[in-house]
Image: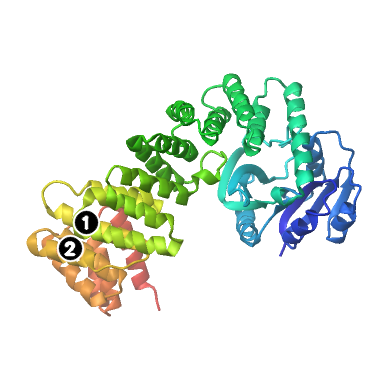
Amino acid sequence: MSLPLSICLIVRDEVDMLPRCLESLRGLGTELIVIDTGSTDQTSEIATRLGAQVTHAAWEHDFATVRNKAVSLATQPWILMLDADEIVDELAGQALRALVPTADPHAIYLFQCFDASSASWTYKPYLFANDARLQFKGRVFADLLPTVPGYRQEVLDAIRIQHRFQERPAAKRENLRTYFIDLLRRRLEDDPADASPMLHLSRMHLDAGEYAESLAMAEQAVEELPDGTDLRLMAYFYGALANYRKKAWEDACEHARTAVALYRDYTELHALLGLANLALGELAQAEESLATAVYLARRPVQVPLPGFAEFRPPVLLEALGRAFEGQGKLQPASICRKLSNANPAEATNLLFHELTGMLRHKQWSSALWLVTLFLPVEISDAAGGLLRSLEGPYAVERFLAEAELWSTVQGLGKTSPMPRRLLIYAAQHFPLDARPLQRLGQIALNEENWNEAVDFLNQALHLDGRSGWSWNALGIASIMVGDQGKARTCFETALQVGNPQEAEGAHKNLAKLTQPV
């Protein structure tokens, strides 16, 4: 079933690119709108044959004007704005089908515009609600900003639109590049207060290997743009990257350090600073910056800033390994090198193997480094907190934390007997503390070992009869072994001794117990 989506494209002489684009959209949207701005080839005929509603418009050297015309023709609740050299592949199509039915109508969704030929990407506003108040602005690289009250931008890093610009004939690419530069200069003349065209010019010169021109535009943008803005951050970054690519390592470090002091959460900035420091032989500084980049790369994208091939995770891991090795830190160097060459499944196995070895040998600081940098965010945040607690005397709290740590690490998809072993050891050595027995009861419940759960929870309640959680858990286990009377007693006791949340759970359990089967 098609989505309630108007898919809009602006085209001109696109016989080479358009068929594959439109084929990738088959069945995705209810409406396909193509604005032809003066093709002299068969573009319009191809679009019509492939199901598009084609409208002709005069070209006024302004992409925003034509995009806004396409928006005015859309009849569906949602609009997907694409270019002829872009493709919605199967994965992106599936993601859109999942997103649109529950999308926030006040969000302007930015997806990755990914160029596979250079492994680089930018973020563009692709999906937004059909609201006439939302208007594109800018002759070229038109922006759709949340200027309407209540609207906001939302970055969806997981949705990647394939950009095929490099598949165009070389002559066409160069003609477009020259034309885009001309339009950007016109855009600057239209609104001298808008410095964003300088950033686009810096990026275009950067991609063409014209580093002096890129640097000049970036530095001009830094002067024009206000502090604390995403655009000024990009200007700093482009300046640093231009210096890095022309191997002016010290200048690259200077630009990047200035930017990092102002903007601390941009992965590529830390990566660039680390790589430049590595080139200069500043190994400790390289380690710090590259490790920060690896850490940040695993976090959700907050700011829609571009990504580059130099800063892909395998490249960063290999560089971080060199920084470690140069300082004689051979264990982390080896792990980084292995991870840089591993596929996702191999990486998971490697991480589990390395981490379990560290935990068995109580290498808490090494384990903390590993989970902080490499484990999935939801696992590393929990495991990191537990590792930080594993200091001081070996009290029962430490056994509980270590057992919980092992359970958390099982989020990697691997099982381990260690949580049970640690808890049994803690129960034996701290026989007056109910907590190890409570945790063993919880593990038994999760594993559906009902009789074992009853045994552990009975022992725990013998030591501490004030735990509403334990009474509720014992009641559930009692039901599963067929002892309804014991279950009722447990839930009634939980009502009396438990905290409000535990009492509420007991009340619900009692209600279920009295329902007829």
Percent coordinates x, y for residue 122 in the rendering: 61, 42
Nearest to the observer: residue 417 or residue 314: 314
Q: Is residue 334 above or below residue 178?
A: below
Tag 2, which secondary structure? helix
Residue topped by disc 1: 402
Residue topped by disc 2: 422
> In the image, 53: left or right of 90?
right
Q: Tell me the kind of residue under disc 2.
A: Leu
Q: Is residue 302 above or below residue 422?
A: above
Q: CA distance from mark 1 to mark 2?
A: 8 Å
- The tag on residue 282 is none
Identify which residue is drawn at 22% across, 54% down: 401
Please indicate, yes or no, whether residue 431 appears anywhere in the rendered image: no
Residue 431, quarter of picture: bottom left
Percent coordinates x, y for residue 106 in the rendering: 63, 42
Q: Quadrant of the C terminus?
A: bottom left
Q: Which comes sooner in the sequence, label 1 or label 2?
A: 1
Tag 1, which secondary structure? helix
Total marks in image:
2
The residue at the far right in this view is: 40
CB within 8 Å, label 1 to label 2:
yes
Please indicate, yes or no, whether residue 65 appears anywhere in the rendered image: yes
Percent coordinates x, y for residue 143 in the rendering: 69, 35
Q: Quadrant of the N terminus?
A: bottom right
Nearest to the observer: residue 449 or residue 61: 61
> In the image, 229: left or right of 299?
right
Percent coordinates x, y for residue 41 in the rendering: 90, 51
Q: Tell me the kind of residue under disc 1.
A: Glu
Q: Residues within 10 Å of mark 1 (few under 14, many from 20)?
A: many
